[in-house]
Amino acid sequence: MPTLSVHVSDNALELVDIKDMDYEAQLNGGVAEFTNNLNADALANALDSLDGELGDISSDALFADVQANVNFRIPDRHEGGAFRIGRRAVLDGRVDY
């Protein structure tokens, strides 16, 4: 029977949310708006929003713990057995903004 377990910090989930906000497209749109119309409002709003998001998670610890296992069981009347094959990855880091 295969099993998978994933544990991540809230700050790591916030990084995923930041990626989903697609700040690259917002910044590109703001630069295009400034280039075409000399209006910097969209660019300033995108930069302020990104600055706030990164400032919120700066210097906080990030971690993820991922385990994947496959368990085998061999039943027998006299001598049975069970085997487990697995891998584990533990990641940690810090956002320095």
Image (spheres, grey):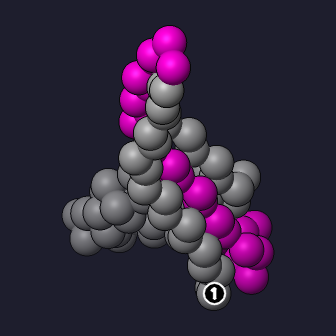
Residue under the image location 60 percent in, 74 percent down: 92
In the picture of the structure, the residue carrying the numbered disc 1 is: 96
Picture layout, residue 68 above or below residue 79 = below
From the viewer's side, name the closer residue of 75 and 55.
75
User: Image quadrant of residue 25?
Assistant: bottom left
Q: In which quarter of the image is residue 32?
A: bottom left
Would you say 96 lies left or right of 24 here?
right
Q: Does the magenta stretch include residue 35?
A: no
Residue with the most extreme bottom position: 96
Quadrant of the rendering where the N terminus is positioned: top left
> From the viewer's perspective, is 17 left or right of 56?
left
- Percent across and percent down for residue 59 are 74, 82
Amino acid found under the numbered disc labelled 1? Asp
Residue pictured at 45% horizontal, 16% vertical = 76
Q: What stretch is highlighted in magenta?
A: 53-78
Q: Please, what secondary structure does the residue beneath circle 1 have?
A: loop
Tell me if residue 76 is in the magenta stretch.
yes
Q: Where is residue 57 in the image (x, y as percent from the top left)?
A: 71, 69
8 or 13, nearer to the observer: 8
Residue reaching furthest top? 77
The number of callouts visible is 1
The residue depicted at 56 percent of the width and 67 percent of the height is 90
Residue 33 at what x, y percent from top left?
32, 60
Query: Where is residue 96, by image quadrant?
Result: bottom right
Kindly identify the residue that appears in the image at 32 percent across and 68 percent down: 31
Evaluate whether residue 23 shows in this view.
Answer: yes
x and y, in percent, of residue 39 in the image: 41, 65
